[in-house]
Amino acid sequence: MLAKRLIVCLDVKDGRVVKGVNFVGLRDAGDPVECAVRYDREQADELVFLDITASHENRDTTVELARRCALELSIPFTIGGGVRSVEDFERLLRAGADKVAINSAAVKNPQLIRDCAARFGKQAVVLAVDARKQPDSSYHVYVKGGREDTGMDALKWIKSGVELGAGEILLTSMDRDGTGEGFDLELTRKAAALVAVPVIASGGVGRLEHLAEGLKAGAAAVLAAGIFHFGQHTVREAKEFLRSQSFNIRPVEMTALA
Protein backbone atom coordinates (compact mmCIF):
# COMPACT_ATOMS: atom_id res chain seq x y z
CA MET A 1 0.00 0.00 0.00
CA LEU A 2 1.36 3.42 -0.95
CA ALA A 3 2.03 5.72 1.98
CA LYS A 4 -0.31 8.64 2.44
CA ARG A 5 1.39 12.04 2.28
CA LEU A 6 1.38 15.13 4.46
CA ILE A 7 2.06 18.23 2.37
CA VAL A 8 2.72 21.75 3.58
CA CYS A 9 1.54 24.55 1.29
CA LEU A 10 3.32 27.89 1.03
CA ASP A 11 1.25 30.53 -0.75
CA VAL A 12 3.62 33.24 -1.99
CA LYS A 13 2.83 36.87 -2.74
CA ASP A 14 5.45 39.57 -3.34
CA GLY A 15 8.18 37.20 -2.22
CA ARG A 16 6.58 36.35 1.14
CA VAL A 17 4.58 33.40 2.44
CA VAL A 18 1.01 34.51 3.17
CA LYS A 19 -2.18 32.93 4.45
CA GLY A 20 -5.73 34.21 4.23
CA VAL A 21 -9.34 33.11 4.47
CA ASN A 22 -11.30 32.24 1.31
CA PHE A 23 -8.33 33.56 -0.71
CA VAL A 24 -8.46 37.07 0.86
CA GLY A 25 -7.34 38.82 4.07
CA LEU A 26 -3.72 37.72 3.73
CA ARG A 27 -1.35 37.50 6.74
CA ASP A 28 2.41 37.42 6.42
CA ALA A 29 3.98 34.10 7.44
CA GLY A 30 7.63 34.62 6.58
CA ASP A 31 10.31 34.11 3.96
CA PRO A 32 9.45 31.20 1.65
CA VAL A 33 12.88 29.58 1.65
CA GLU A 34 13.28 29.90 5.42
CA CYS A 35 9.84 28.37 5.92
CA ALA A 36 10.61 25.60 3.43
CA VAL A 37 13.86 24.69 5.17
CA ARG A 38 12.02 24.41 8.48
CA TYR A 39 9.42 22.07 7.00
CA ASP A 40 12.14 20.06 5.27
CA ARG A 41 13.85 19.60 8.64
CA GLU A 42 10.52 18.63 10.23
CA GLN A 43 10.17 16.02 7.46
CA ALA A 44 7.03 17.04 5.68
CA ASP A 45 6.57 14.59 2.81
CA GLU A 46 6.35 17.34 0.22
CA LEU A 47 5.99 21.10 -0.18
CA VAL A 48 3.81 23.06 -2.57
CA PHE A 49 4.64 26.65 -3.49
CA LEU A 50 1.87 28.63 -5.17
CA ASP A 51 2.46 32.17 -6.42
CA ILE A 52 -1.14 33.16 -5.77
CA THR A 53 -1.26 36.40 -7.77
CA ALA A 54 0.89 35.44 -10.77
CA SER A 55 -2.03 34.59 -13.08
CA HIS A 56 -4.10 37.58 -12.00
CA GLU A 57 -1.14 39.92 -12.52
CA ASN A 58 -0.22 38.17 -15.78
CA ARG A 59 3.41 37.51 -14.83
CA ASP A 60 5.70 34.53 -14.61
CA THR A 61 6.19 32.40 -11.53
CA THR A 62 9.58 33.22 -10.07
CA VAL A 63 12.09 30.69 -11.31
CA GLU A 64 14.56 32.08 -8.79
CA LEU A 65 12.41 30.76 -5.93
CA ALA A 66 12.59 27.28 -7.42
CA ARG A 67 16.37 27.56 -7.73
CA ARG A 68 16.80 28.73 -4.16
CA CYS A 69 14.60 25.95 -2.83
CA ALA A 70 16.31 23.27 -4.90
CA LEU A 71 19.63 24.20 -3.29
CA GLU A 72 18.24 23.90 0.23
CA LEU A 73 15.62 21.13 0.22
CA SER A 74 15.90 17.35 0.37
CA ILE A 75 12.15 16.66 0.02
CA PRO A 76 10.16 16.97 -3.24
CA PHE A 77 8.44 20.24 -4.04
CA THR A 78 5.84 21.45 -6.49
CA ILE A 79 5.68 25.04 -7.71
CA GLY A 80 2.93 26.82 -9.62
CA GLY A 81 1.31 30.12 -10.45
CA GLY A 82 1.50 31.98 -13.75
CA VAL A 83 2.60 28.94 -15.77
CA ARG A 84 1.27 29.60 -19.27
CA SER A 85 3.37 27.49 -21.63
CA VAL A 86 5.46 24.36 -22.01
CA GLU A 87 8.50 26.63 -21.83
CA ASP A 88 7.38 28.04 -18.45
CA PHE A 89 6.87 24.49 -17.22
CA GLU A 90 10.33 23.44 -18.40
CA ARG A 91 12.06 26.43 -16.78
CA LEU A 92 10.67 25.49 -13.38
CA LEU A 93 11.69 21.85 -13.73
CA ARG A 94 15.17 22.85 -14.84
CA ALA A 95 15.39 25.18 -11.85
CA GLY A 96 14.84 22.20 -9.56
CA ALA A 97 11.10 21.73 -9.03
CA ASP A 98 9.98 18.10 -8.96
CA LYS A 99 6.47 18.89 -10.21
CA VAL A 100 4.69 21.92 -11.65
CA ALA A 101 1.12 22.94 -10.90
CA ILE A 102 -1.01 24.49 -13.63
CA ASN A 103 -4.46 26.02 -13.22
CA SER A 104 -5.66 29.07 -15.13
CA ALA A 105 -3.64 28.40 -18.27
CA ALA A 106 -4.87 24.80 -18.42
CA VAL A 107 -8.48 25.97 -18.30
CA LYS A 108 -7.79 28.43 -21.12
CA ASN A 109 -5.78 25.89 -23.13
CA PRO A 110 -6.36 22.25 -22.06
CA GLN A 111 -3.84 21.10 -24.67
CA LEU A 112 -1.17 22.46 -22.32
CA ILE A 113 -1.80 19.49 -20.01
CA ARG A 114 -1.34 17.00 -22.84
CA ASP A 115 1.79 18.74 -24.15
CA CYS A 116 3.47 18.92 -20.74
CA ALA A 117 2.61 15.31 -19.91
CA ALA A 118 3.98 14.11 -23.24
CA ARG A 119 7.22 16.02 -22.82
CA PHE A 120 7.95 15.67 -19.11
CA GLY A 121 5.83 12.72 -17.98
CA LYS A 122 2.48 12.64 -16.23
CA GLN A 123 4.14 12.44 -12.83
CA ALA A 124 5.39 16.03 -13.25
CA VAL A 125 1.99 17.52 -14.10
CA VAL A 126 -0.20 18.66 -11.21
CA LEU A 127 -3.59 20.06 -12.16
CA ALA A 128 -4.60 22.58 -9.51
CA VAL A 129 -8.36 23.04 -9.24
CA ASP A 130 -9.87 25.82 -7.13
CA ALA A 131 -13.53 24.88 -6.61
CA ARG A 132 -16.47 26.67 -5.00
CA LYS A 133 -19.87 25.16 -4.23
CA GLN A 134 -22.84 26.67 -6.03
CA PRO A 135 -26.49 27.09 -4.89
CA ASP A 136 -27.46 23.99 -6.88
CA SER A 137 -24.78 21.98 -4.99
CA SER A 138 -22.53 21.67 -8.02
CA TYR A 139 -18.94 22.93 -7.91
CA HIS A 140 -17.49 25.51 -10.29
CA VAL A 141 -13.86 25.97 -11.29
CA TYR A 142 -12.36 29.36 -10.41
CA VAL A 143 -9.21 30.81 -11.96
CA LYS A 144 -6.89 33.80 -11.59
CA GLY A 145 -6.33 33.20 -7.91
CA GLY A 146 -10.01 32.56 -7.24
CA ARG A 147 -11.14 35.83 -8.79
CA GLU A 148 -12.98 34.47 -11.83
CA ASP A 149 -15.79 31.92 -12.03
CA THR A 150 -15.37 29.92 -15.23
CA GLY A 151 -18.81 28.32 -14.93
CA MET A 152 -17.12 24.95 -15.56
CA ASP A 153 -18.16 21.94 -13.51
CA ALA A 154 -15.17 21.12 -11.29
CA LEU A 155 -15.65 17.35 -11.27
CA LYS A 156 -16.02 17.17 -15.04
CA TRP A 157 -12.90 19.30 -15.40
CA ILE A 158 -10.94 17.02 -13.06
CA LYS A 159 -11.94 13.96 -15.10
CA SER A 160 -11.03 15.72 -18.33
CA GLY A 161 -7.71 16.92 -16.92
CA VAL A 162 -6.69 13.39 -15.95
CA GLU A 163 -7.68 12.09 -19.38
CA LEU A 164 -5.44 14.77 -20.90
CA GLY A 165 -2.49 13.63 -18.81
CA ALA A 166 -2.50 15.22 -15.37
CA GLY A 167 -0.75 12.89 -12.95
CA GLU A 168 -2.12 14.45 -9.78
CA ILE A 169 -4.98 16.72 -8.72
CA LEU A 170 -4.50 19.50 -6.18
CA LEU A 171 -8.10 20.16 -5.16
CA THR A 172 -8.77 23.26 -3.08
CA SER A 173 -12.15 24.12 -1.63
CA MET A 174 -12.42 27.89 -1.80
CA ASP A 175 -15.31 27.80 0.65
CA ARG A 176 -13.15 26.11 3.30
CA ASP A 177 -9.81 27.79 2.59
CA GLY A 178 -8.39 29.29 5.78
CA THR A 179 -11.57 28.75 7.78
CA GLY A 180 -10.26 25.96 10.00
CA GLU A 181 -13.57 24.12 9.52
CA GLY A 182 -12.10 21.08 7.79
CA PHE A 183 -11.99 19.87 4.20
CA ASP A 184 -15.05 19.81 1.98
CA LEU A 185 -15.35 16.06 2.37
CA GLU A 186 -18.12 15.71 -0.19
CA LEU A 187 -15.95 17.33 -2.84
CA THR A 188 -12.90 15.30 -1.83
CA ARG A 189 -14.83 12.03 -1.83
CA LYS A 190 -16.37 12.63 -5.25
CA ALA A 191 -13.08 13.62 -6.85
CA ALA A 192 -11.12 10.71 -5.35
CA ALA A 193 -13.75 8.24 -6.57
CA LEU A 194 -13.76 9.76 -10.04
CA VAL A 195 -10.11 9.43 -11.04
CA ALA A 196 -7.31 6.92 -10.60
CA VAL A 197 -4.54 9.48 -10.01
CA PRO A 198 -3.76 10.88 -6.53
CA VAL A 199 -6.02 13.64 -5.23
CA ILE A 200 -4.56 16.12 -2.74
CA ALA A 201 -7.19 17.53 -0.39
CA SER A 202 -6.70 21.22 0.32
CA GLY A 203 -8.56 23.97 2.12
CA GLY A 204 -9.87 24.15 5.66
CA VAL A 205 -7.54 22.32 8.04
CA GLY A 206 -7.91 23.69 11.55
CA ARG A 207 -7.33 20.56 13.65
CA LEU A 208 -5.33 17.38 13.24
CA GLU A 209 -8.60 15.43 13.04
CA HIS A 210 -9.33 17.21 9.78
CA LEU A 211 -6.25 15.62 8.20
CA ALA A 212 -7.54 12.17 9.10
CA GLU A 213 -10.98 13.01 7.71
CA GLY A 214 -9.46 13.98 4.37
CA LEU A 215 -7.59 10.71 4.09
CA LYS A 216 -10.68 8.73 5.07
CA ALA A 217 -12.56 10.52 2.27
CA GLY A 218 -10.14 9.04 -0.23
CA ALA A 219 -7.43 11.65 -0.62
CA ALA A 220 -3.95 10.29 -1.32
CA ALA A 221 -2.45 13.30 0.42
CA VAL A 222 -3.61 16.09 2.70
CA LEU A 223 -2.32 19.63 2.49
CA ALA A 224 -2.27 22.23 5.22
CA ALA A 225 -0.74 25.63 5.81
CA GLY A 226 -1.98 27.81 8.64
CA ILE A 227 -1.81 25.21 11.41
CA PHE A 228 1.90 24.88 10.70
CA HIS A 229 2.82 28.46 9.74
CA PHE A 230 1.49 30.00 12.93
CA GLY A 231 2.71 27.36 15.39
CA GLN A 232 -0.53 25.57 16.18
CA HIS A 233 1.02 22.21 15.35
CA THR A 234 4.28 20.78 14.04
CA VAL A 235 4.65 18.35 11.18
CA ARG A 236 5.85 15.77 13.69
CA GLU A 237 2.68 16.14 15.76
CA ALA A 238 0.54 15.77 12.65
CA LYS A 239 2.37 12.67 11.48
CA GLU A 240 2.27 11.05 14.89
CA PHE A 241 -1.45 11.71 15.11
CA LEU A 242 -2.13 10.19 11.69
CA ARG A 243 -0.02 7.14 12.50
CA SER A 244 -1.99 6.75 15.74
CA GLN A 245 -5.10 6.61 13.55
CA SER A 246 -3.57 3.68 11.62
CA PHE A 247 -2.71 5.62 8.46
CA ASN A 248 0.36 4.54 6.54
CA ILE A 249 2.39 7.75 6.98
CA ARG A 250 6.18 7.99 6.83
CA PRO A 251 7.44 8.52 10.36
CA VAL A 252 9.63 11.40 11.48
CA GLU A 253 13.14 10.12 12.05
CA MET A 254 14.39 11.51 15.35
CA THR A 255 18.03 11.56 14.20
CA ALA A 256 17.13 14.07 11.49
CA LEU A 257 15.72 16.45 14.08
CA ALA A 258 18.77 16.31 16.35
Image: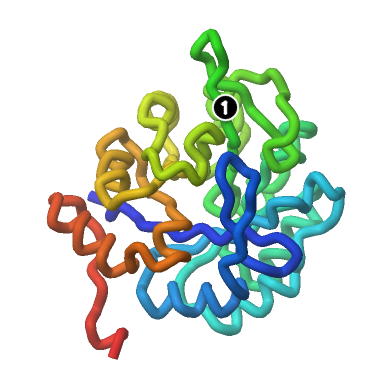
Query: Is residue 177 toward the left or the right of residue 83 in the image?
Result: left
Which residue shows up at 41% across the image and 63% down it?
Answer: 228
Q: Quadrant of residue 147?
A: top right
Which is nearer the eye, 91 or 37?
37
Q: Residue furthest right?
A: 58
Which is nearer the eye, 164 or 56?
56
Q: Is residue 158 visible?
A: yes
Residue 73 locus on image (x, y percent): 51, 78
Q: Is residue 190 above or below residue 75?
A: above
Which element type, helix, strand or loop, lies under badge 1?
strand
Q: Is residue 91 visible?
A: no
Q: Quadrant of residue 93?
A: bottom right
Count every numbered label the image shows and give the total: 1
Which is nearer the eye, 51 or 123?
51
Which residue shows up at 68% across the image and 77% down it?
Answer: 67
Three-letter amino acid code at disc 1? Answer: Arg
Residue 195 locus on image (x, y percent): 44, 30
Q: Residue furthest bottom?
A: 258
Residue 162 locus on image (x, y percent): 55, 33
Which residue shows up at 46% across the image and 44% down it?
Answer: 202
Q: Is residue 164 above or below residue 71?
A: above
Residue matched to label 1: 132
Q: Is residue 221 above or below residue 88?
A: above
Which residue shows up at 38% across the image and 39% down it?
Answer: 181
Query: In the rendered image, which quarter contains the C terminus?
Result: bottom left
Q: Quadrant of residue 256?
A: bottom left
Residue 103 locus on image (x, y percent): 68, 41
Question: Quick one: label 1, few (<14), some, or many (20+) residues within 10 Å?
Answer: many
